[in-house]
């Protein structure tokens, strides 16, 4: 997988079954789905089952975005807590949220049942525990979750999990999956249903009675309907980017401890921690632990992986050794619900974005919702996920995230931390000042320097160096670029970093 330097525990896929096809040279497409992550492939399958002709356009490989960087908990016990969701979306909204994520888990389960190996799908309980032993938050969430239709009950410390976790809130009917196996199966289903995969990078999508898709090489193709399932929209739309914020999340995996039941676990800390078990194809049991989230491009901390291991060993002393570590991008909508549905700025274009930590279920329910909308059917979730909604009941968070993004422009005024390229170590990078310019300079393993204009092509913030992923990360809206080439790793940018001449 070339989207980043760290390697997840899941098997990578890259090429779809049957390989990549060419785009038809002149004909308009029926449905084009841009992005072959869980959201894109599930949408493709749902629309193929409706008899539509679907072309999936992907720049990298199957699951090569965030989908294979997940920890793959399947949960309708949502990260944002039902007492918060009920405040922001009303009690009916919280009920719809619970039902939609439950429907997504059911959909995944039914697809796994048709697979040869079951894709590691298993229904298991989920446990929320207090990071400081405080049960009041658990009690509040128990009441709100039950009101929303998610069965939850308090369990005493040590009754079903190591006592060190304290009292737990147990949720029924959660699940886990082997996401590598699932994406392989999903891609096969898309292929078998007549879907076509094209490898190409899209730079813009224009809506209309016929939509136009623009590619990196300048070529274009038209389509009746386009679904932008690129994790964040990379085309010109104002629908979402001011209403969601990008975070990095870190994961480590190692040998599973003996005293942990097969379940999902997560705590109430901010940033929170999440834990699950995973049995690989060789029968080896792993513990997967994630967390230590921070805003993309802000407060990067190379000790995140060490802290995750320490956190794990404090609770499960015989866990490890840890052999895998990776990070990924999570897009947090300010009101906790993804943005799924018609793009208000582009006719016949549909969006699936704002995944949050529940992105596998958000992506799956997003596909079911978009399928209905494309086919002109009503869907009870339309309003809850409408990309055009104004998150007024989450106004505080909305203002905070945008003020935070605006504040990052101060980098244009700050001096560089490193004054000279000589101080950049092998495999390291830094933003240097050259007159009015900021230059992002990377020194590769052989000592060669690679220089780029550090101005993020999205809206002009200055990118920052991430030592863990060896990438240039934008602190404003989360665009990320490969350290040595400046190629796009994450949107919303649709342009790579511009190369620059560098003279020592
Ligand atoms: C560390 C971590 C842990 C997580 N844990 C969980 C969890 O336990 N449970 C859960 O439900 N969710 C979890 N998530 C979230 C979940 O994994 C993601 O939300 C979900 O996989 C996103 O799927 P997607 O299809 O929307 O995006 P992606 O998987 O990113 O797919 C988008 C695709 O679009 C392609 N693309 C982008 N731009 C272009 C372009 N211009 N042209 C062509 N193709 C393009 C990309 O290459 C990519 O393949 C986690 C995420 C992370 C990072
Ligand atoms: S991502 Fe918006 S300015 Fe960089």
Image: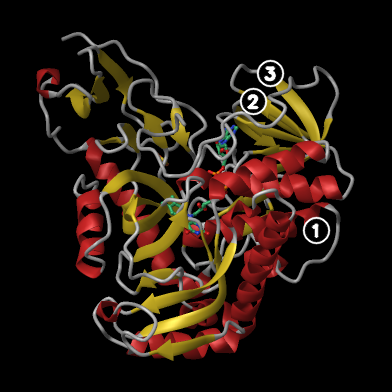
Labels 1 and 3 touching (C-beta < 8 A): no
Residue 4 location in percent, x, y?
39, 34
Dot placed on the residue nearer the N-terminal end, 3 or 2: 2
Q: CA distance from mark 1 to mark 3?
A: 30 Å
Residue, disc 3: 219
Residue 293 location in percent, x, y?
32, 56
- Marking on residue 441: none
Residue 24 location in percent, x, y?
80, 21
Give the side of residue 366 with respect to residue 71, left or right.
right
Residue 74 location in percent, x, y?
55, 63
Seen at 39% across and 54% down, the residue is 286
* Mark 3 nearby-residue class (10 Å; few <14, some 14–19, many ≥20): few
Seen at 46% across and 82% down, the residue is 170
Seen at 59% across and 21% down, the residue is 216
Dot placed on the residue nearer the N-terminal end, 2 or 1: 2
- Dividing the image into 4 quarters, which one contains the C terminus? top left
- Marking on residue 372: 1
Compared with 148, 39 (above or below) is: above
Which residue is situated farthest in the front direction here? Answer: 283
Q: Which of 468 and 378 lies nearest the eye of the viewer?
A: 468
Compared with 455, 87 (above or below) is: below
Q: CA distance from mark 3 to mark 2?
A: 14 Å
Residue, disc 2: 199
> Which callout, 3 or 2, points to the residue nearer the camera?
2
Seen at 12% across and 29% down, the residue is 418
* Mark 2 nearby-residue class (10 Å; few <14, some 14–19, many ≥20): many
């Amino acid at each position: 997988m070339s989207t980043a330097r760290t390697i997840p525990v899941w098997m990578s896929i890259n090429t779809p079954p049957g390989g990549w096809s060419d785009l038809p040279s002149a004909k308009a497409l029926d449905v084009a789905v841009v992005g072959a992550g869980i959201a894109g492939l599930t949408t493709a399958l749902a629309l193929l089952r409706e008899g539509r002709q679907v072309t999936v356009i992907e720049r990298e490989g199957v699951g090569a975005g965030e989908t294979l960087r997940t920890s793959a908990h399947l949960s309708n016990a949502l990260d944002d807590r039902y007492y918060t969701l009920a405040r922001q979306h009303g009690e009916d909204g919280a009920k719809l949220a619970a039902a939609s994520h439950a429907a997504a888990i059911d959909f995944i389960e039914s697809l796994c049942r048709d697979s040869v190996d079951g894709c590691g799908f298993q229904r298991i309980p989920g446990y929320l525990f207090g990071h400081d032993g405080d049960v009041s938050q658990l009690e509040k969430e128990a009441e709100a979750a039950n009101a929303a239709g998610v069965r939850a009950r308090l369990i005493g410390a040590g009754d079903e999990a190591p006592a060190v976790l304290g009292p737990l809130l147990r949720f029924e009917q959660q699940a886990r999956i082997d996401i590598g196996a699932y994406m392989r199966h999903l891609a096969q289903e898309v292929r078998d249903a007549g879907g076509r995969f094209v490898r190409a990078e899209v730079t813009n999508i224009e809506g209309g009675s016929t939509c136009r898709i623009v590619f990196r090489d300048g070529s274009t193709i038209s389509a009746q309907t386009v679904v932008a399932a690129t994790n964040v929209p990379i085309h010109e739309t104002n629908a979402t980017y001011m209403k969601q914020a990008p975070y990095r999340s870190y994961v480590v995996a190692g040998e599973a401890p003996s005293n942990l039941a097969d379940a999902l676990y997560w705590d109430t800390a901010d940033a929170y921690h999440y834990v699950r078990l995973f049995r690989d194809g060789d029968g080896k049991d792993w513990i997967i632990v994630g967390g230590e989230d921070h805003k993309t491009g802000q407060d990067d901390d190379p000790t995140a992986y060490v802290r995750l291991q320490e956190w794990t060993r404090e609770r499960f002393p015989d866990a490890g050794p840890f052999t895998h570590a990776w990070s990924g991008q999570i897009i947090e909508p300010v009101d906790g619900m993804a943005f799924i549905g018609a793009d208000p700025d582009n006719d016949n274009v549909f969006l699936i974005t704002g995944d949050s930590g529940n992105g596998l279920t958000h992506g799956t329910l997003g596909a079911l919702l978009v399928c209905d909308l494309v086919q002109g059917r009503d869907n009870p979730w339309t309003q809850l996920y409408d990309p055009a909604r104004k998150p007024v009941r989450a106004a505080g968070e909305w203002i905070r995230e945008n003020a935070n993004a605006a504040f990052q422009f101060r980098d244009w005024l700050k001096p560089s931390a490193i004054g000279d390229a000589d101080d950049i170590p092998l495999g390291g990078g830094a933003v240097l000042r050259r007159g009015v310019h900021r230059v992002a300079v990377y020194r590769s393993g052989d000592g060669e320097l690679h220089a780029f204009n550090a101005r993020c092509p999205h809206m002009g913030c200055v990118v920052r160096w991430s030592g863990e992923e060896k990438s240039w990360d934008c602190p404003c809206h989360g665009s990320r670029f490969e350290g040595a080439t400046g190629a796009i790793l994450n949107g919303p940018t649709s342009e790579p970093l511009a190369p620059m001449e560098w003279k020592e």
